[in-house]
């Protein structure tokens, strides 16, 4: 059974999150996107947990849930949350975010009972806990060995395990003796598997990609995800596929190009300065305009810790593909002001009605049929994204990267700015080319 899973999103009680992030809307847009499993997010928040309990029903023996009152929904929910730990290590304050997965609502309630001793769970959907990362894992695993903890968006400059401002150089320093329970990490928008493969120390960890979405719009939810191929769709089957790093079951991760992330290159947004690692290092990480310290980008941070050359790939690991949300492809081609414009939705809905969901459009839909439904330029843009034949102007210091779909015509995708990967964003209502057209089957 092939299923795509996005295991890290947020509910409506998290900071800077859309008020429409409720179970029903999450399920609706997850299905449009093509997700088979989506995280509940934020089970630590009392009000959100109550909504989870009221709107989801356990599938017998699966450790997964279906939405109540939506009999046609094909989306399963996994009980998940993200928490922030603040603690001191070697005389420095560390701020690290973690994703928690649980096999049931009852187990989540037991986790909450323990974590409430370390912070106010009602203050935010992603609570801040005054405890070390190791202590967090110890508390979670004492509730149930079926629980999972892994570092969230591992490379972003702030609030991550390898973050340039408050992170670590080694996973073992963060989780101490509890590292034995950590078997995965989340790459985040500004890194992808090839960047992580450059660190031999990460070989034993499974690389996951999730959206960290704060809204249900299809250009947010599922923008990064994981494609599984399992015999039975259960919590334990998915977790075992992750834990074993089995490429026959965890087939690949769906990634945006890491240059598209807000913190890929080093830079200073206020001065419009964006620099690749070599140039930032040459300047001593000081902005050449205002002479303040640059925000160190993920690529530079990887370069600092890497012990392998670019292009290295370990044996027998899950694959990956780079995709771009369909709404943003259409926004660029149609010259629309935003992905929620009526002309974008009109074409989007036409494609979804024919092919069933967005992932199928992006990864499988034949060029000729896309042309029949839309036009050659839209079809060519989708194929270029599928085949990785687009140019990316790297993001930096909170500024999203810019995708140039047709460099020869200067057609691109402009993005908003914000302080974190998905925080601070506003909610908003041809010929075939030379490369061989590929479909999803080519990635296995």
Image (spheres, rainbow, N blue to C red):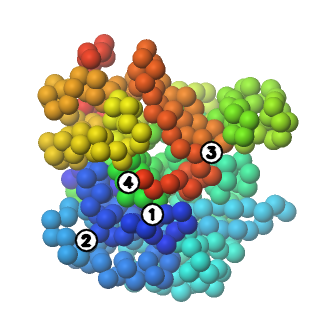
Per the model, the C-alpha gap separating discs 3 and 4 is 23 Å
| Circle nearer the viewer, 3 or 2 | 3
Left or right of residue 37, residue 318 in this image: right
Along the polypeptide, which appears first: circle 1 or circle 4? 1
Whether 9 is drawn above or below 186: the answer is below
- As helix, strand or loop, the secondary structure at mark 2 comes to strand
Q: Residues within 10 Å of mark 4 (few under 14, many from 20)?
A: few
- As helix, strand or loop, the secondary structure at mark 3 comes to loop
Residue 14 shows in this picture:
yes
Left or right of residue 237, residue 88 in this image: right
Left or right of residue 4, residue 199 in this image: right
Depth check: give the residue in front, 381 or 302. Answer: 381
Along the polypeptide, which appears first: circle 2 or circle 1? 1
| Circle nearer the viewer, 1 or 4 | 4
Per the model, the C-alpha gap separating discs 1 and 3 is 20 Å
| Circle nearer the viewer, 3 or 4 | 4
Q: Residues within 10 Å of mark 3 (few under 14, many from 20)?
A: many
Task: Report the residue marked by disc 4.
Answer: 429
Q: Are marks 1 and 3 in contact (CB under 8 Å)?
A: no
Task: Report the residue marked by disc 2.
Answer: 66
Per the model, the C-alpha gap separating discs 3 and 2 is 36 Å
What label sits on residue 71 in the rendered view?
none
Q: Are marks 2 and 1 in contact (CB under 8 Å)?
A: no
Task: Report the residue marked by disc 1.
Answer: 18
Task: Report the residue marked by disc 3.
Answer: 398
Q: Could you tell me residue 335's position as x and y percent?
A: 38, 31
| Circle nearer the viewer, 2 or 4 | 4
Residue 360 shows in this picture:
no
Q: Could you tell me residue 39's position as x and y percent?
A: 39, 64
Q: Are marks 2 and 4 in contact (CB under 8 Å)?
A: no
């Amino acid at each position: 059974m092939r299923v795509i899973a996005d295991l890290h999103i947020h509910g409506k009680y998290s900071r800077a999150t859309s008020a429409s992030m409720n179970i029903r809307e999450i399920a609706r847009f997850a299905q449009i996107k093509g997700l088979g499993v989506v995280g509940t997010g934020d089970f630590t928040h009392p009000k959100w947990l109550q909504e989870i309990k009221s709107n989801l029903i356990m599938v017998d023996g699966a450790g997964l849930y279906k939405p109540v009152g939506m009999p046609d929904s094909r989306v399963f929910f996994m009980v998940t949350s993200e928490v922030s730990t603040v603690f001191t290590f070697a005389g420095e304050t560390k701020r690290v975010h973690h994703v928690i997965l649980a096999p049931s609502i009852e187990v989540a309630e037991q986790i909450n009972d323990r974590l409430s001793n370390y912070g106010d769970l009602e203050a935010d959907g992603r609570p801040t806990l005054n405890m070390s990362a190791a202590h967090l894992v110890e508390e979670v695993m004492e509730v149930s060995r079926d629980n999972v903890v892994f570092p969230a968006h591992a490379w972003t400059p702030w609030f991550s395990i390898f973050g340039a401002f408050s992170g670590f150089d080694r996973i073992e320093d963060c989780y101490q003796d509890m590292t034995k329970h950590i078997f995965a990490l989340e790459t985040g928008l500004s890194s992808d598997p090839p960047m992580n493969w450059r660190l031999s120390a990460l070989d034993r960890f499974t690389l996951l990609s999730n959206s960290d979405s704060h809204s249900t719009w299809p250009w947010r939810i599922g923008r990064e995800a994981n494609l599984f191929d399992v015999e039975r769709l259960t919590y334990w089957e998915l977790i075992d596929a992750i834990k074993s790093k089995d490429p026959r079951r965890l087939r690949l991760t769906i990634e945006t190009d890491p240059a598209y992330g807000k913190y890929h290159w080093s830079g200073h947004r206020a001065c419009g300065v964006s620099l690749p690692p070599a140039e930032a290092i040459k300047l001593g990480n000081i902005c050449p305009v205002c002479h303040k310290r640059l925000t160190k980008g993920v690529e530079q941070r990887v370069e600092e810790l890497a012990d392998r050359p670019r292009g290295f790939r370990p044996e027998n690991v899950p694959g990956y593909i780079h995709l771009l949300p369909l709404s943003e492809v259409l926004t660029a081609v149609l010259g629309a002001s935003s992905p929620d414009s009526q002309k974008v939705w009109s074409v989007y809905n036409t494609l979804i009605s024919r092919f069933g969901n967005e992932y199928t459009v992006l990864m499988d839909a034949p060029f000729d049929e896309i042309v029949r439904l839309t036009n050659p330029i839209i079809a060519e843009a989708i194929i270029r994204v599928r085949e990785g034949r687009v140019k990316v102007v790297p993001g930096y210091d909170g500024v999203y990267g810019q995708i140039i779909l047709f460099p020869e015509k200067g057609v691109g995708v402009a993005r908003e700015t914000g302080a974190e990967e998905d925080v601070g964003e506003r909610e908003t209502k041809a010929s075939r080319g030379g490369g061989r057209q590929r479909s999803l089957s080519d990635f296995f």
